[in-house]
Amino acid sequence: MSQSWLLKNGRIIDPQNGVDRQGDLLVVHGTVAGPGEAATDEVREIDVQGCWIVPGLIDMHVHLREPGEEYKEDIVSGTRAAAAGGFTAVACMPNTRPVNDGMAVTILILQRARDGFARVYPVGAISKSSRGESLAEFGDMKAAGVVALSDDGRPVRDSQLMRRALEYAGDYGLRVISHSEEQALGRHGVMNEGVVSTSLGLMGIPTAAESIMVYRDIALAEYTGKPVHIAHVSTIMSLDLIRSAKARGVRVTAETAPHYFTLTDEAVAGYNTNAKMNPPLRSEPDRLAVCEALADGTLDAVATDHAPHSTLEKEVEFDLAANGIIGLETSVPLTLALVRQGLIDEKRFVELLSVNPAGILGVTGGSLATGVPADLTVINPALEFDYTQDTVVSRSRNSPFLGWRLQGRAVLTMVDGRVMYDLNQRCEQRSS
Amino acid sequence: MNSGKTMTTGCHFSHKHILGIEHLSAEHIDHILQTAESFKEISGRSIKKVPTLRGRTIVNLFFEPSTRTRLSFEIAAKRMSADTFNISASTSSATKGETLIDTARNISAMHPDIIIIRHSCSGAPEMLTRYVRASVINAGDGTHEHPSQGLLDMMTVREHKGRLDGLKITIIGDILHSRVAHSDIIGFARMGSRVFVYGPATLIPVGLEKLGAVVCGSLEEAVRDADVVMTLRIQKERQSDPLLPTFREYAQSYGVTREIMALARDDALVMHPGPINRGVELMPDVADSSQSVILDQVTNGVAVRMALLYLVMGNT
Ligand SMILES: [Zn+2]
């Protein structure tokens, strides 16, 4: 029997149900209780004055590295970082070793996730071993528990395979998440092509490498009538393509990551390998376009592309360094910065980080309606903290935001009414 | 009275490392060139050795094959009585999968005073500075910079022209992959020269204007009234990136011939960082003409490198 909680004096922001009010939220037996409902057993009260109570945040794009690269992260350490960052659920990409291209790996991931600190939604591979040659068994994986399909990190080059994937995924109600990249254009590149790459003497990846494939994926979604989700969008042209496709009624959704609306390719200066990722950090006009697209609905979700790497992959020459940064613990403050800048409002913040990811993946969450599982996040939007090596919860520390003073963070993360993270240690967290 | 040119006498040269021209002010470039000019005299003596760096240990750490640059640094070090050691990629642990950092830490533990590094990855010298106590001199990193080459080019031009300010410097060829071009563009522009570049669009990187160069629309435009015409070694393809169809066509469209040189000023200099593809980027008669200062570049290379070794050791 789980504990009952009364979260007192918070600002409850629940856009799915048109709620934005000051008040208390009662959690009984792991579910959100209705107004006036009384807890039968002992209720623990927590004063959350000054904080927001929002439906649990969902990061729809993370790499948990298990199985195969547990020295970087595993499901327990990754979900611990997720909970600390305010996430009650994560969708993990299939580029593990072996690739999650079948029931066996999916089951293993879900088994490990029982000891985790957040819900784990496995994403299955589009193609066997993500080699881009033949379709993986979507039906089997769906039965085992995958919520979407992607060859993230190994973009699907063959357009026929992509078309068939969209069609076949539809039969199982799964959405394809596309890492849209024409790799031939970025083959030599290690960062965004522009003034900065020229002055650093680093080979560039042109923005067209992304937008060409975004267009292909939109064209296939439009032609087949099937939905497609575009991962980590980073360029003006891609956003324009998505915006106009949405206006035509194409079933396309899209996400971006906090680094694309926070940083530009200038962050690579000094050959900072923690600013190396794919797609690469772009120019200032691209960054501004991403901000605008988050506000106007062109982008549906903020997802971190949490990609842990150890110093083995990052403390090397820039050309040789692995792509990717961790993001679970910095997503909330970086996205809150957009709220403070007046670019998005609180409601939109919750949509981008909770409501829309739940809708796109077709999973529970994104709502604080009476009777739903009590997956919720309490955020103190004013709290400032220093994000440093020592405070990182993830097993890896490859973040360009180390040393930043950030504002706003999750102070309490609850899944099914159980406390997964409590900044103030008021409640005992679940042990593992 | 104090025109600014006399500033250099009181120049405080504070660079521990030489990673790129980008980090050097005009004043510091001028100071390095003046120091190099004074060292050049040593190379003309019958006994070409001064005791300035006696007892200093200099390691040449070359992860990329190089004969000319390594030899030039080695001669420079020996003329200053330093002890030099060469570590090349084939004999170092690099091929055994040891990381640059491990190699750096191992060398650092032997307490060298200066590490001269060449590496195929841009930024490797900057990275090295974070793991060693020694001064680091970049002898060419990826497609980033080759500062000693840029300095010797400036020294050679100044020696012949008496100044750098206001000159038209034209660089032709593979700007995209040329660390020499990057160092030259930044350096000449910083010294007040007007830098023009030209080459096939496949070899012109974006954003060159920000580095201080004007991208020309034709070979004629680039060369007309130039004080210096520098061509760069061309490669047909790199890592399967199709940059050019043939050397033949490159020579026809971009090769610097006697006819093209006629558009430049009569006293224009012909330069090339070497090694030359004769008959491709530069026709043999131009390379060997009286306008060519290609061998002066080589001679000045030793003097510039002596100056760099001297200055990073805290001498001014
Ligand atoms: Zn991806």
Image (cartoon, helix red, strand yellow):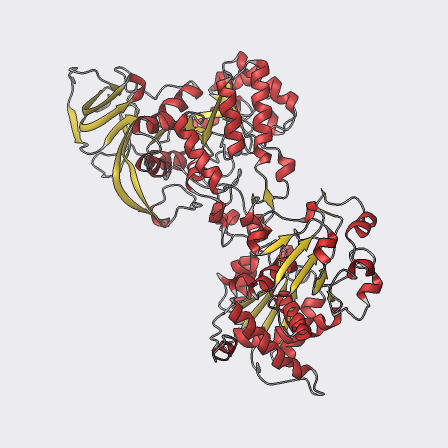
* Nearest to the observer: residue B290 or residue A245: B290
Picture quadrant of residue B40: bottom right
Left or right: residue B172 versus residue A226 is: right
Q: Would residue B241 appear left or right of A339 to someone viewing this image?
A: right
Left/right of residue B308 with respect to residue A74 in the rendered view = right
Is residue A419 shown above or below B224? Answer: above
Quadrant into which the N terminus of chain A falls: top left
Tell me residue B175's x, y (percent). Answer: 66, 53
Residue A305 shows in the view: no
Q: If the image is split into quadrants, where does the C terminus of chain A sit?
A: top left
User: How far across and down, in percent of the image, does residue B160 sit?
Assistant: 69, 74
Q: Is residue A175 visible?
A: yes
Q: Residue at x 55, y 25 (%)?
A: A125
Query: For residue B165, which quarter of the picture?
Result: bottom right
- Identified at 27% across, 15% down, the residue is A371
Q: Using the image as rendered, state which of residue B90 and residue A305 is in the foreground.
A: A305
